[in-house]
Image: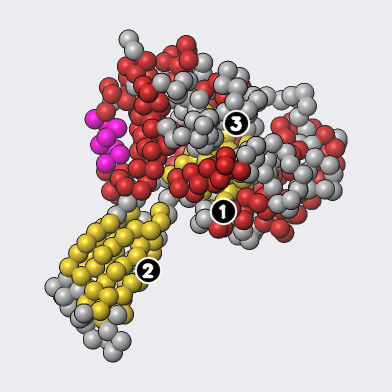
Amino acid sequence: MSRRCDVLKLFEEKKAFMEDRVRHGIEQNRKGTASLHFKDAEGREVNGAHIEIRQKTHDFHYGANLFMLDEFNSEEQNQAYRKYFAKTFNMATLPFYWSDLEPEQGKPRFAKDSPKVYRRPAPDLCLEYCEANGIEPKAHCLNYAHFTPQWAKGDIWKEKHLLDKRFRELAERYSGRIRDWEVTNETFWGMRIPGYCTFYDQDDFIEWSFETAERYFHTNRLIINEAHSRIWDNEHYQGNRSPYYMQIERAIRNGARIDCIGMQFHMFYRAEKEAEETAQFYDPERIFDVLDTYAKLGRSIQITELTIPAYAYTEEDEEIQAEIIRHLYSMWFSHPAMEAILYWNLADGFAHGAKQGDMTAGENYFHGGLLRYDFTPKASCRTIQDLFQKVWRTNLSLDTETDGLAFKGFYGTYELEITADGKTEKRDIHLDRHSNNKFDIII
């Protein structure tokens, strides 16, 4: 069989189930009804208005990591990256890896003019870009044991003391500008791992990290994050007896304020093993079962890191990547607990574990970006843009006979262009999942 048939097999076999859940889920969970009533400045009803309704933004977040912001060798590449990121996404994952953010104790790389570390743009630079482009930033990650700097390792008291200081300093500088903070990441790699910090092996690693984060990040949202295999695969997924599920359940029971459950979805499998390895991940019934199970914990869910390989630059390989992305995004978007989907690398050739442009090494091998190495967009990039900017977007042209009307649309902000009695005016409204969405419009 062809790669297309092998890899897309379960999407096709379970198409009816998948499409039914997606269709009903999107209508129920991603849309609401806005009621508009029009009056003049004296409070009199305005009848017979014409209204152009244009959605401006989505409440649902979709993004990628921002690790290559101004990291390229040419200004042309830097500008292309900036353009495509803002054109495609409304959320960005910012790098707060401790060993790279503070390679020398007491000299954190916060400022935009800090010394360069590859794939680790300074937080101030990232925030300047996000705020200028209406992009919601999120932080990755407060206590990621694999990235503990050498100078911070030692006995447990020392490590906790320095972690507490790190949490406090980051909160003082950034808690007002970054809402979402991943607190821990990838804690199922075993015990007594060479090079890891001493504290990683302790029973209270998760609980202490969240308790300390809550102390300093009072009004922020705190996220736990884990690798894809520990969540989705046949070995680790056992319903509410799954290790990650039980870890979260125990931490919450012990008082940890976990606001959101992070799930990775990196399909880092060699091309010759793709069909065999990914079948357990590309099963619509498994995907919804995992989401339904973790939703029972009463927390929202984010797909925090996502890579779908193309493996090559052939038209068919890129179309397969795009089709997989379309199916996955549709299922995740439809689920009531899901609040964000974050792709990993925007562009090919600049991923972890390889020299720039070496498409045979590290994560570059998978050709998992949405842009090619030359910054031309793949079908997958256009797919994400089309889903959020066309398919999942509400634009309407309506007329009223009375003083009001109602419309159903995707949650987000809207511009209303209202024409009545020979005058045209514009108003903005927010169709919010958590509000009654009744609007009195004075014109």
> Residue 354 at x, y = what percent?
64, 24
Instruction: From the viewer's side, name the closer residue of 108 and 219.
Output: 108
Residue matched to label 3: 350
The circle drawn on residue 393 is none
> Residue 299 at x, y = what percent?
49, 47
Q: Quadrant of the N terminus?
A: top left
Which one is earlier in the sequence, the residue at label 1 or at label 2? 1
User: CA–CA distance between discs 1 and 2?
Assistant: 22 Å
- Quadrant of residue 72 within the rendered picture: top right
Q: Secondary structure at mark 1?
A: helix
Residue matched to label 1: 130
Query: In the image, is 423 to the left or to the right of 228?
Result: left
User: CA–CA distance between discs 2 and 3?
Assistant: 40 Å
> Residue 275 at x, y = what percent?
41, 15
- Name the residue located 74 percent from the left edge and 24 percent from the top edge: 193
The boundaries of the magenta stretch are: 16-23
Instruction: From the viewer's side, name the closer residue of 35 and 362.
Output: 362
User: CA–CA distance between discs 3 and 1?
Assistant: 21 Å
The circle drawn on residue 428 is 2
Which one is earlier in the sequence, the residue at label 3 or at label 1? 1
- 43 part of magenta stretch: no
User: As displayed, is residue 274 above or below residue 253?
Assistant: above
- Name the residue located 80 percent from the left edge and 40 percent from the top edge: 103
Tell me the amino acid under the disc marked 2: Asp
- Nearer mark to the viewer, of 3 and 1: 3
Q: Secondary structure at mark 2?
A: strand
- Nearer mark to the viewer, of 2 and 3: 3
Please say whether residue 340 is visible from this viewpoint. no
> Residue 125 at x, y = what percent?
66, 51
